[in-house]
């Protein structure tokens, strides 16, 4: 069974999928309508579209780096701390 982005249909784990995680408080604002807490998925592009629509900017995002790209390397722990502590205005 394939899992796809709720908005655009991009296949989870397929070509072009980037694993991105935003704070829970932000996800509650942008999650697909009708999905229960924590369910449903959005690709990073569709997350950005929904964030822009709400006027949210500079939302921290954890990118789960997989080969061949490693996103955070040495700064990972600091950025992870910022992600956990961030609260929307």
Image: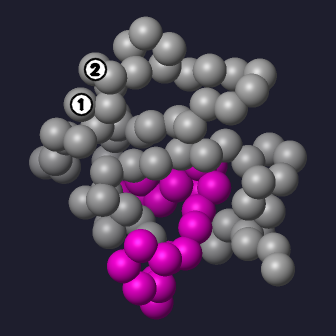
Q: Is residue 60 left or right of residue 45?
A: left
Question: How many C-alpha atoms fall within 10 Å of the one at disc 2: few (<14), some, or many (≥20)?
Answer: few
Q: Is residue 80 left or right of residue 74?
A: left
Residue 34's place in the image compared with 7, above or below, is below
Q: Is residue 57 visible?
A: no
Return the mark for residue 82. 1
Q: Which residue is mark 2?
A: 78
Is-magenta flag for residue 48? Answer: yes
Measuring 32% from the left and 23% from the top, which residue is drawn there? 77
Q: Which residues are magenta?
A: 32-54
Residue 21's place in the image compared with 60, above or below, is below
Could you tell me residue 79's position as x and y percent?
A: 32, 25
Measuring 32% from the left and 31% from the top, which residue is drawn there? 80
Question: How many C-alpha atoms fall within 10 Å of the one at disc 1: few (<14), some, or many (≥20)?
Answer: few
Residues at marks 2 and 1, CA–CA distance in whole angstroms:
6 Å
Q: Are marks 2 and 1 in contact (CB under 8 Å)?
A: yes
Could you tell me residue 86's position as x and y percent?
A: 19, 41
In which image quadrant can residue 37 be found? Answer: bottom left
Is-magenta flag for residue 51? Answer: yes
Residue 31's place in the image compared with 84, above or below, is below
Could you tell me residue 71's position as x and y percent?
A: 56, 22
């Amino acid at each position: 069974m394939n899992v796809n982005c709720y908005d655009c249909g991009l296949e989870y784990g397929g070509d072009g999928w980037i694993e991105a995680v935003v704070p829970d408080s932000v996800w509650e604002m942008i999650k697909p309508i009708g999905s229960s807490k924590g369910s449903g998925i959005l690709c990073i592009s569709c997350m950005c579209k929904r964030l822009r629509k709400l006027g949210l900017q500079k939302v921290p995002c954890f990118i789960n780096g997989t080969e061949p790209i490693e996103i955070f390397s040495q700064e990972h722990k600091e950025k992870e701390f910022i992600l956990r502590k961030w609260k929307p205005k």
